[in-house]
Image: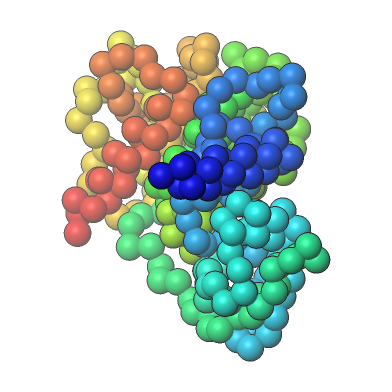
């Protein structure tokens, strides 16, 4: 019994040291707020999956040295060794079975055993246009949208967006969150993250056949859900301060249908998750 506790304690220490070295935060690893030692939390890998992102997959029989962070995670946290197998995916529709050939201080080298193309998702294509929430809530939104199979993520700027949410470009951390979420839930494709836009510009661009704006109960429609359809759909989720009256009017004029998601006012990440789930369910109902 004592030996088992010592083993688990040693493993926990390794995990904690690895997290500290990478600055990993809440999404798959630990819950909590930013700390002085963790000013820019990020998430890279999920220890719950044996499937990892690699942007370019070698052909069967070829070997590749995995990225340093991923190799360190496999070797020191998961304790994988020569002969262990794992799955790799490129986020563009292909995946590969690989076997570890070398796992040492020089890195982790794997040989690709086989490659295959993932099947097309049987459900409808979804786009999420959203106000950027703060801190770890953004990680939650990105991860949950990825798990629900969203194809496009469009951050938007609103009249009531706080300064912290007015992005000029997409931070690299977003991609790492998407990669970890896709690996954990067995997705073959990563969502396409589009450059930030003002709401008006997005409304003037071509939209999917069905587009909805998530509104509070007093201004939305009854909670009946969207009409059944297999066609592509978009969901617009506004900022914490809500849409301005002018923005709501512009969205309606642009063809967006009001959608009430709950009898209460929801946070951005909650509204996104609930709305996407309703759109997916509506797509399945038409089959």
Q: Quadrant of residue 203?
A: top right
Could you tell me which residue is drawn at 46 percent across and 42 percent down?
Answer: 2
Could you tell me which residue is drawn at 61 percent across and 69 percent down?
Answer: 81
Q: Is residue 262 left or right of residue 15?
A: left
Q: Position of residue 16 (x, y in %)?
A: 63, 37
Could you tell me which residue is drawn at 70 percent across and 80 percent down?
Answer: 63
Query: Where 196 sits versus 157, above or below?
Result: below
Query: Where 100 sits versus 258, above or below?
Result: below
> Which quadrant, please, contains the N terminus?
top left
Given residues 4 and 134, the one toward you in this image is: 4
Q: Position of residue 9 (x, y in %)?
A: 54, 40
Q: Let me know if residue 281 appears in the view.
A: yes
The image's colour scheme reads rainbow
Q: Quadrant of residue 108?
A: bottom right
Q: Let me know if residue 249 appears in the view.
A: no
Could you tell me which residue is drawn at 50 percent across and 33 percent down?
Answer: 140
Query: Where 177 sits versus 72, above or below?
Result: above
């Amino acid at each position: 019994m004592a030996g088992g506790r010592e083993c688990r304690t040693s493993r926990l220490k390794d995990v904690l040291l690895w997290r500290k070295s990478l600055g990993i935060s809440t999404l798959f690893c630990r819950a909590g707020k930013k700390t002085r030692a963790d000013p820019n939390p990020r998430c890279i890998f999920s220890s719950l999956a044996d499937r990892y992102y690699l942007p370019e997959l070698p052909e069967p029989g070829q070997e590749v040295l995995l990225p340093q962070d991923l190799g360190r995670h496999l070797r020191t946290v998961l304790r994988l060794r020569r002969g262990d197998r794992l799955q790799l995916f490129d986020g563009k529709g292909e995946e590969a079975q690989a076997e570890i050939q070398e796992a040492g201080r020089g890195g982790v080298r794997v040989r690709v055993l086989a490659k295959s193309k993932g099947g097309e998702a049987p459900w409808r294509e979804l786009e999420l246009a959203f106000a950027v929430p703060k801190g770890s809530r953004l990680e939650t939104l990105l991860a949950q949208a990825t798990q629900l199979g969203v194809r496009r993520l469009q951050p938007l700027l609103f009249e009531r967006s706080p300064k912290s949410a007015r992005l000029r470009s997409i931070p690299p951390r977003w991609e790492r969150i998407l990669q970890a979420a896709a690996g954990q839930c067995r997705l073959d494709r990563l969502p396409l993250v589009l450059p930030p836009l003002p709401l008006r510009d997005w409304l003037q661009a071509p939209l999917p056949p069905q587009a909805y704006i998530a509104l509070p109960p007093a201004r939305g429609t009854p909670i009946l859900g969207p009409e059944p359809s297999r066609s592509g759909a978009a969901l617009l989720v506004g900022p914490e301060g809500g849409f301005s009256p002018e923005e709501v009017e512009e969205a309606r004029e642009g063809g967006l249908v009001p959608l009430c998601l709950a009898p209460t006012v929801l946070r951005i990440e909650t509204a996104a998750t609930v709305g996407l789930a309703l759109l997916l369910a509506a797509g399945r109902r038409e089959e």
